Amino acid sequence: MNNNKNSIKDIDRTLYDFKDDESRGDFFREKEGITEEIVRHISEEKEEPQWMLDFRLKCLKIYKETPMPVWGPDISELDMDQIASYVRHKSEMKNNWEDVPEDNSTIENWSKNMFNLNTKRVVVDEGGKMEWVSGSFGSHVSYLYPMTILKGEGAQMTYTGITFSGEGQNLDTGAKVVHLAPRTTSVITSKSISKSGGIGTFRSSVVIAKQAKESKCSVSCDSLMLDSISRADTVPAMDIRAHDADVGHEAKIGRISDEAVFYLMSRGMTEEDAKALIVSGFADSVSKELPLEYAVEMNNLIKLEMSGHKT
């Protein structure tokens, strides 16, 4: 018990508990909301070409005409009219790292009232490989589904993700992949942990086009609930048009085993330590895919979440 407390105490979260003070006058903040006037001003500030401005205005029109999604977590409390969509440091662009001010992409430490609405997309050409590694622990609500388009023959994609949803969190994550060329390969692996009423949802979308002959895809999603008030859902979608494709899907949803907890407690561990050990073991396959420093941080975050500490 004492060792666990010490290890939690040793994680100095105050290192990341800071924010830039805009009152110093070193920042430019656009006014709140998203309007055509604001978009034009931002484009002018960034000295963008006309085609980029036209693209932004086209997107703004689509945004205004598109209703909010009703298939995922509720984001009705997100009021874009109260949010400044563009804030930047007033320092000039630099061409060399040596010229970049020390206080300038910092570490983002998201709080539990954060909305993470994230869009990522990549096109992989012949012989190329894309690797996604995703870890979602912070934020109040997340929409996160990186998309990969395997355009060239032999292109590959791997996605490894883990989420930990605690009290007041609804983390909706997953991956999308489109196979457009022969002998392309994708592997999607996801781990989801939920406790204290948290909601974890995994979504995957796999499309294998008719011309993507001899392509392979494997999807595996495991979800672990630590109590009776939490929730875990998996929503896989597959559209397979090639007759010789090799596709597999596996999903497991379960609760933490009382027998496993009892066994570890019979060996002298506290209930909290036993559950933390089981969860760390559940996430081990993801941890092995991470660089060492990120794997250590992920395990520390799991310990913090399991201890009930608020971050």
Image: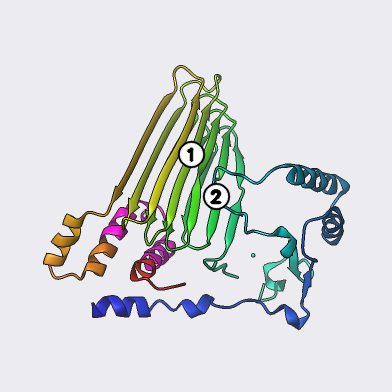
Front residue of 69 and 277: 69
Front residue of 32 and 290: 32
Front residue of 166 and 294: 166
> Which amino acid, mark 1?
Ser
Q: Residues within 10 Å of mark 1 (few under 14, many from 20)?
A: many
Mark 1: which secondary structure? strand
Name the outermost residue toward the bottom: 24
Q: Which residue is tagged 2?
A: 144
Q: Choose top left, top right, bottom left or bottom right for residue 6.
A: bottom left
Q: Which residues are magenta?
A: 278-302
Residue found 23% across the figure and 65% down from its top: 274
Residue 126: image x %, image y %? Answer: 57, 32
> Which amino acid, mark 2?
Leu
**Residue 280 lies within the magenta run:** yes
Q: Residues within 10 Å of mark 2 (few under 14, many from 20)?
A: many
Q: Which residue is tagged 1?
A: 204
Image position of 257 with respect to 294: above or below? above
Q: Report the quarter where the N terminus lies.
A: bottom left
